Image (cartoon, grey):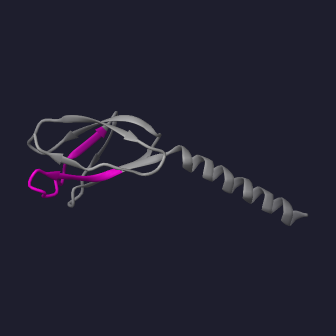
Amino acid sequence: MKKIKLLAVLLCLLFATAIVAKRYSELSGQVKWKDGQPAKGTVLSIGGYSVRTDKNGGYKFKILKPGEYVVSISPPGKRTKSFKVNVTDKHTKKDFIINW
């Protein structure tokens, strides 16, 4: 009987984890200069949350609910520019080219 109860509890936890995981998504990609070089050190912001690109120009926002967001991009030595991005319930990939 204890094994059945334990199995039931584990299945409930697994099901709850799957539901929570479905509610959130990620947005990631690369930021490059117009010559194709990685734009390392570029700051991307969504609301009050910011990330900085790595040496390869890569970035990742985690734990986003699906929906439309405004991503503000602040490259070193350039003005900030904003773009609308639609984040789906699956992992969303969006690359940006700094050509302004």
Residue at x 26%, y 43% (from the top left corner): 44
Across and down, in percent, residue 74 comes to 18, 40
Residue at x 61%, y 52% (from the top left corner): 18
Camera sees residue 69? yes
As for residue 64 lying within the magenta part, the answer is no
Across and down, in percent, residue 28 comes to 34, 51
Q: Residue furthest bottom?
A: 3
Please identify the quarter of the rendering in which residue 76 is found. Answer: top left
Q: In which quadrant of the rendered image does the C terminus lie? A: top left
What count of labels does the image hold?
0
Across and down, in percent, residue 64 comes to 44, 42
Q: Is residue 32 left or right of residue 5?
A: left
Q: Is residue 96 left or right of residue 23?
A: left
Across and down, in percent, residue 66 comes to 46, 40
Camera sees residue 60? no
What range is drawn magenta here?
28-45
Q: Is residue 5 placed above or below 75 in the rendered structure?
A: below
Q: Is residue 17 placed above or below 79 in the rendered structure?
A: below
Q: In which quadrant of the rendered image does the N terminus lie? A: bottom right
Q: Is residue 51 left or right of residue 8?
A: left
Residue at x 12%, y 51% (from the top left corner): 33
As for residue 30 lying within the magenta part, the answer is yes
In the image, 11 versus 98, the foreground residue is 98
Residue at x 42%, y 49% (from the top left corner): 26
